[in-house]
Amino acid sequence: MMKAKVVKMSEEELDLAALQEAGEILRRGGLVGFPTETVYGLGGNALDPSASRKIYAAKGRPSDNPLIIHIADMDDLPYIVKNIPEKAAWLAEAFWPGPLTMIFEKSDVVPYETTGGLDTVAVRFPSHKIAKEMILAGGGYVAAPSANTSGRPSPTEAKHVEEDLGEEIDMIIDGGRVDIGLESTIVDCTVDPPVILRPGYVNQEMLEKVINRVEMDPGLTSENEKVRPKAPGMRYRHYAPKAKLVLVDGDDTAVAAYISAEVRKKEAEGQQVGIICADETRELYTEGLIRCIGRRQKEEEIAQRLYAVLRDFDEEDISFIYSETFNTPKIGTAIMNRLNKAAGHEIIYLS
Ligand code: TXA
Ligand code: MG
């Protein structure tokens, strides 16, 4: 295939002609990379089985890992789901449009190609203006996984999409760097109480303010191999950098001392080592390839930069990355979920 056509626009200045063109590409079964408030998505017509197959092929994604259908109008929801549980309606009212995905029983119009063979369907109504306009132009139902090659960190900038999928898709809409930087929170609303299958910007506390009780999928944190996450995508080792990533948890100075000692040891053996630290602890490090991820006091920055930092390290000739942990108050659960997965749950506790 030819290289994807890249068009630039912003939420403030939409390029309506280009959005129309993106819509036409989607309607005739093609694929478009586009920005959302969470990460860039790889969009295809969700009701067209062949478009879904193309998405799996472009990403190199296992076909049992279902896609999220993106809508841009609440009135479009009933067509793709069997029913809307009361609690899902409340959550939609509170968090849509926004970084929340909900699981429903699927209606007959949703092809199994899109749901990875499941009778349930994931639905999200994004708040990003470019995403919304593109979805409407494309017919209202856009299946979109994150626009990365399977196994790489999700794209937070258009150039990441170009790197991974530039040769596989028809068009990329460059809307600049995304706002949140981590994928949406997924809540299974086919069970009561609803269950968080993937933590995100909308956290448990925020959800519980609306529907009282929400559980966390035990598969997300269990060390027991038999307790598997319910969302198929959470079972794979995702977001894996090329270098071996190790997390180090504990008191700031102890963590910096441990990491620095490891860096010296590995450098003496001729290996290059990367370090991921917060702005606040930057000065505790003197060697290694140091990447500041943002301020602990501004946890949004950490979420926003995490994937770009992991991607940056893939460009370097390093064999190890040591990272601090970021159990920040609001988004910490989501940040640590992604970091833990990237590290294959390799974490060292000091204390
Ligand atoms: O923020 C996001 O959600 C981004 C943007 C583009 O909207 N999309 C995204 O899609 O992260 P993807 O495909 O990378 O992740 C979808 C996740 C996977 O872990 C998948 O297994 C899960 O949602 N999922 C989809 N349908 C499901 C279902 N019916 N039951 C359980 N999990 C489901
Ligand atoms: Mg993904």
Image: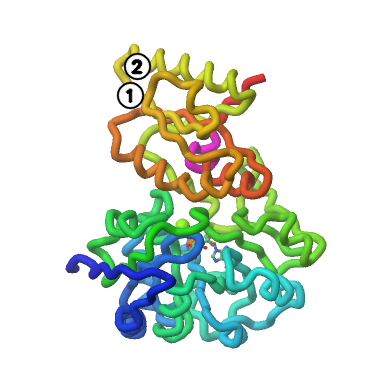
| 240 horizontally vs 336: left or right | left
Q: Find out whether residue 145 is within the magenta segment.
A: no
In depth, the one of 345 and 223 nearer the eye is 345
Residue 214 falls in which quadrant of the image? bottom right
Position of the C terminus by quadrant: top right
The residue under the point 65% across, 47% down is: 227
Residue type at numbered disc 1: Gln
Q: What is the crowding at mark 2: few (fewer than 14 residues within 10 Å), some, or many (at least 20)?
A: some
Considering every residue shown, the one lying at the far right of the view is 212
What segment is highlighted magenta in the picture? 340-345
Q: Earlier in the sequence, mark 1 or mark 2?
A: 2
Given contact means CB atoms under 8 Å apart, are the residues at marks 1 and 2 in contact?
yes
The residue under the point 64% across, 83% down is: 82
Residue type at numbered disc 2: Glu
Position of the N terminus by quadrant: bottom left
Q: Position of residue 18 (x, y in %)?
A: 30, 79
* Residue 113 seen from this side: no
> Circle 1 is placed at which residue position?
272
Total tally of numbered discs in the picture: 2
> Circle 2 is placed at which residue position?
267
Q: Position of residue 307 (x, y in %)?
A: 44, 47
Q: Position of residue 83 (x, y in %)?
A: 68, 82
